[in-house]
Amino acid sequence: MMKREREKRKKRVLPYLQAIPDILKYQLVSKTALGVLLFVLKAAMLRTLHSTGRVAVSSGDYMFLFTTWQGILLIAMALVSLFLYVTFDLNTMILFSGKRLKQENTTVWACMKESIAKIRRFFCPAGIGIVLYIALLAPILGFGISISLTENLYIPTFITSVIETTPLYNTLYTIAIIVFTLIGFANLFSLHGILLEDLPVKGSLSQSRTLMKKNWKSYIRHNLSYLLLFGLIMVLLAVLLLVLPLMLLPLVIKTEGMYRGMVLAMCLNAAAVFAFAGVMAVPVYLMRITELYYRYKENPDISYEAMERRRHPYMIAACILLIAGVLAVSYYGNKAFDEIFPPQITCPVIAHRAGGNEGAENCVAGLEKAAALGAWGSEIDIQRTKDGYYVLNHDSTFQRTAGVNKKPEDMTLEEVRALSVNGEPVPTLEEMLEASRDKIVLFIELKGNTADRQMADDTVRIVKEAGMEDQCVLISLQYDLIDYTEKTYPEIQTGYLTFLSFGNTAALNCDYLGLEEESATADAMNAIHAQGKKVLVWTPNEGDSQKHFLLSKADGIITDNVSQAFDIIRQLENRTDFERILDGIFN
């Protein structure tokens, strides 16, 4: 009985093992085709964007998307990009999985052609809804299948911080997460019905809900077992490729240089294997979901018999090239070790809202504490009062910080002076300038309803009167305001904060570009540096995020957790060679 059960399980694993070479081919072919198509589409989008006189469109300059024909055309082309990603990232693999599980003769190219032909089925309200859910909601929810373009999409921390600190928003957000997760769960098999059975979109959605209603317990059980198995495989690989070799290596190699080179080679080899596992994870997961779909449909055509063995010389060639590449990189990496894996952290820390969590928000005491800890900069938010003074406040009112539901522009300076933020007075811009003088660089964000050209003019005047032009940077989420400041006062440093952008963002008219965590990629930083500008990353508060960007080429991180950032810096500067290699490769 147990032997038959083992044989049965072994047979069920066979389709997955035998599909590995074809999955690799699928990833190569589909991503190449997708890359070519998107290159052409991106070129057309950039040409359309440049016809408006803009070099980029970003979160602070987006209204033209909805008010001009060029903007509407860009939105349409962006939707086409999402459809292409769904076609090549998901639909092709689902079709391939279905045919492979039934042991039908097929090729990746044939599945791609069929997937392209069937994409027209999604050109309806329900189909567009499926695509948008997969592209935008699934990665944010962390549930279901998503496309590689947006798999790391998440709600920016500056938005989640507001949600978390506002009970009503937090409640509505939690309800929305639960509702959309349940919707995604119920409609998980919608793509399968459309692609594998040629069902209309609405019919497939209905069928998926029926299947999940009957089999939700089974699906959760199989899903958890898959994730557990994948996790165990990754742990086993880590032990075999890193832990055991590192334990044995000192017993064999005594020379420091050779030891470091071998450690580097092992880490690179492990990284290649983990990358391979990452490439395989989603296609195998889709194949598993497809198998469950057929099982829940009680489809008798699934075959678990062994297929005819085929030779795959390209896989052997790829392995040989990989080994040669690892050895070559290890050799040269060992020669330039400190340059590739710097022992010192040079990325400056900038306290968010004066001192971050080190003191009352946007107050002098917080700034002074951040400076004492060693922060290089302090970011503050200024707004104009009714009588023309500039005071510090982040929100539209003083409700959250001082318990008064009034806007700065509706209050006089005297009225603002009467407020208290955790026992600290609300300071003026002049007071913050004096407190920061020769201690810390001040990043002054032009904020709120009064952020206009008058605010820019007045701030520049106040900074110049204090003689602190070289110790201040004017920043804003409004690009037109930063562009105006940069053109009118080129002697003043400026910074533009953005969390979404398309086009040549690095060419925007400013000295600093502040990127939200999601958009602060290595490619984006390199492009900005190539234009002679600097990169700020806002607002990495979690330890892993801080570590990631402290090790990056960022020119500063804006964070609420200043003490934590310096603790991480101290840890990073006391790493072993092995830890530096791991951080350099896997970061």
Image (tube, grey):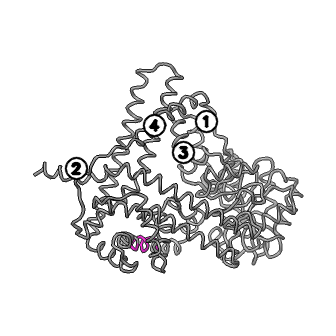
Residue at x-position 41% and y-position 61%: 110
Amino acid on which disc 4 is placed: Asn
**Residue 392 at x, y = what percent?**
73, 65
Amino acid on which disc 1 is placed: Ile
Q: Do tag 2 and tag 1 residues touch (Cβ < 8 Å)? A: no
Q: Is residue 232 above or below residue 145?
A: above
**Residue 287 at x, y = what percent?**
34, 59
As helix, strand or loop, the secondary structure at mark 4 comes to helix
Q: Is residue 470 above or below residue 313?
A: below
Instruction: Name which of mark 4 and mark 3 comes first in the sequence.
Output: 4
| Viewer-proximal residue among 439 and 516 | 516
Amino acid on which disc 3 is placed: Asn
Where residue 479 sits, quadrant-wise, is bottom right
Amino acid on which disc 2 is placed: Lys
Label 2, label 1: how many angstroms apart (C-alpha)? 45 Å
Query: What is the crowding at mark 4: few (fewer than 14 residues within 10 Å), some, or many (at least 20)?
Result: many
Residue 587 numbered tag? 3
Label 3, label 2: how many angstroms apart (C-alpha)? 37 Å
Foreground disc of the pair 4, 3: 4
Q: Which residues are magenta?
A: 176-183
Instruction: Name which of mark 2 and mark 1 comes first in the sequence.
Output: 2
Label 4, label 2: how many angstroms apart (C-alpha)? 29 Å
Query: What is the crowding at mark 2: few (fewer than 14 residues within 10 Å), some, or many (at least 20)?
Result: few
Residue 340 numbered tag? 1
Residue 269 numbered tag? 4
Q: Do tag 1 and tag 3 residues touch (Cβ < 8 Å)? A: no
Foreground disc of the pair 3, 2: 2
| Outermost residue toward the left in this view | 1
Question: Which residue lies under the disc numbered 2?
Answer: 10
Q: Do tag 4 and tag 3 residues touch (Cβ < 8 Å)? A: no
| Viewer-proximal residue among 51 and 4 | 51
